[in-house]
Image (spheres, grey):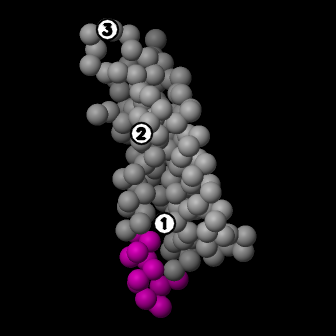
Amino acid sequence: MSRRIVTVQYQSHSDKSIDGYFDRVIKYIPGDIVGAWVAVTGLIESAGDDVPVNTVLWTAFIIGVVLTAVWTLKQTRERKKRPAMTQTIVSTVAFIVWVFALGSPFSTLEFYRPLYGSLALIFYSLVVGLIIPSEDSIR
């Protein structure tokens, strides 16, 4: 299955079908990157007292944001189609929302409450499937 969201079907005999709401939700959420984030935070937080945990977590978060965008562009690349910019932006924001919901490194900020992260994750996951990208073929 391609990671790119399919919004148009040009040929009736094509084996690709148009992605519905739940397909879009699954393709928008970068599960592989979120899984890597969980592993990275576990490693960083168990590293010991000689590691500046907050600095390393924030650095890893920034790297994760960039990696999510690059990874999504790579995974959604198809010949004769424009880059899936809408999907890349939505997936990158999804990574940020997931990290916010998981806590670290946002838990170091004064305003952060776990409730905010949980609510953001629920609402974002419900709304994100309503976004239908309009990237067309390159002409």
Instruction: Verify CB contact (< 8 Å) between mark 3 and mark 2.
Output: no
Instruction: Please tell me which of labels 1 and 3 falls first in the chain.
Output: 3
Task: Say which element carries label 2.
Answer: helix
Which residue is under mark 3? Answer: 12
Q: Is residue 65 visible?
A: no
Residue bounds of the magenta highlight: 40-52
Which residue lies under the disc numbered 2? 27
Instruction: Give the tally of numbered discs.
Output: 3
Q: Is residue 35 above or below residue 10?
A: below
Give the residue displayed 39% in from the left and 51% down from the top: 31
For image coordinates 52% across by 66% down, the residue present is: 102
Task: Please name whichever residue, 77 or 113, is drawn nearer the observer in this view of the structure.
Answer: 113
Q: Position of residue 120 (x, y in %)?
A: 62, 54
Q: Where in the figure is residue 135, as x and y percent of width and height?
A: 50, 23
Q: What is the three-letter code of the residue carrying label 2?
A: Lys
Please tell me whether mark 3 sits on a helix, a strand or a loop: loop
Q: Amino acid at mark 1?
A: Ala
The local secondary structure at tag 1 comes to helix
Q: Work out whether mark 3 precedes mark 2 in sequence or the reverse, and give the earlier one.
A: 3
Q: Give the residue pinned by disc 1.
A: 60
